[in-house]
Image (tube, grey):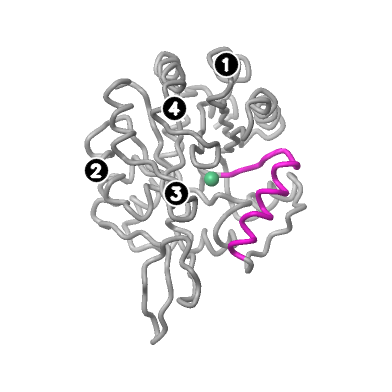
Amino acid sequence: MIDAHIHIFPSYRRIKAIRWIKKYIPGLVINEAIEETEILDKLRSLNISYFFNYIYPLRPEESISLNKYNNQLAKRVKNAICFGSVHPDNTDRIKIIEEAIIDFDLIGLKFHPFVQGFKILDKRMEDVYQIMQELGRPIVFHTGFEYFYKAKMSPDEIELILKKYPKLVIVISHMFYPHIDKAFHLLEKYENIYLDGTNIFSNYRESINGENVFEGMLTKKNGEYYYEVCFNYSIFELEKYSHRIMFGSDFPVAMNNLDNIYEYIKNIDISESAKKNILENTAKNFIKRFKPDFFDERGE
Ligand SMILES: [Zn+2]
């Protein structure tokens, strides 16, 4: 199984990030001081063969050092597929991206516009999209959970980028939750789109006495009501496009305990072949598409 959405950050960011998620989900069993080796052991113990590691700078001064960090991580940990990033406030964006992709050998870029504080149609991002299209490498965007982040990004904005940069490959993380239909609409219309179901397949539930910050659906089971973050779209479409859908956990800032998340996705009600795509093959083919030698170099 491949976990296509992990956040191993340098410790100064890791502690803050885990503290932040635990503020909203106090029941999580995760130590904010968790070490990189413990994260890797945990993934290994749950049979994760490969994982995607995402970092992104909150300040422009962090961009290069974070990219370097992920470059080092990829060298230390042979089953990590590492992404870089950049901040719109960096004036030397192109140089940073070329260094990340060419010198640091990172596979693509990840952006979290809500946390990094920019709009994806920001003029400063145009050269970023242009160079990524030229390099033929993917961009991963955080999307959805807008009520929680108190920020907005419409699927139309992604569509405008795709129209202007038709060869750019984009991964839509979190499928615009709760508007999953809009993510599938883009998937159907544009060949270069992939979806990432991180957090959707998290089995996250909140009591109806809470604020429902994660926009869960009101659900009733065994006579009890709760808010549930779940896949609220067509299982038929999930099957049909499973070769373009990946799965991830967001660990160590996941919305549920990791074993619970993996158990949940392994038991969703779709065919074994679609499940195999979502849990492994799509991510594997994605890696091969951008790094054709990745598995050969690892003797696979
Ligand atoms: Zn994430």
Q: Depth check: 175 or 90 in front?
A: 90
Q: Is mark 4 within 8 Å of ligand 1?
A: no
User: Does 122 sit left or right of 75 as displayed?
Assistant: left
Closer to us: mark 2 or mark 3? 2
In which image quadrant can residue 281 be found?
top left
Magenta stretch bounds? 6-25
Q: Pointer 4: residues within 10 angstroms few (<14), some, or many (20+)?
A: many
- Mark 3 lies on residue: 279
Give the amino acid type for the residue marked by disc 2 in the picture.
His
Rounded to the nearest whole Å, what is the CA distance between mark 3 and mark 4? 19 Å
Q: Is mark 3 within 8 Å of ligand 1?
A: no
Report the disc number at residue 91.
1
Give the amino acid type for the residue marked by disc 1 in the picture.
Thr
Task: Choose the circle earlier in sequence order: 1 or 2.
Answer: 1
Q: Pointer 1: residues within 10 angstroms few (<14), some, or many (20+)?
A: few
Q: Depth check: 123 or 235 in front?
A: 123
> Element under label 3?
helix
Task: Choose the circle earlier in sequence order: 3 or 4.
Answer: 4
Rounded to the nearest whole Å, what is the CA distance between mark 1 and mark 4? 21 Å
Residue 59, position as x, y percentages in the image: 64, 31
Rounded to the nearest whole Å, what is the CA distance between mark 1 and mark 3? 38 Å
Report the disc number at residue 138.
4
What residue do we see at 36% from left, 37% from top? 194
Report the disc number at residue 185.
2
Task: Choose the circle earlier in sequence order: 1 or 3.
Answer: 1
In which image quadrant can residue 223 be found?
bottom left
In which image quadrant can residue 267 be found?
bottom left
Give the amino acid type for the residue marked by disc 4 in the picture.
Pro
Rounded to the nearest whole Å, what is the CA distance between mark 2 and mark 4? 19 Å
Decide whether the magenta segment is chiefly helix, strand or loop. helix
> Element under label 1?
loop
The vertical placement of 277 against 99, above or below, is below
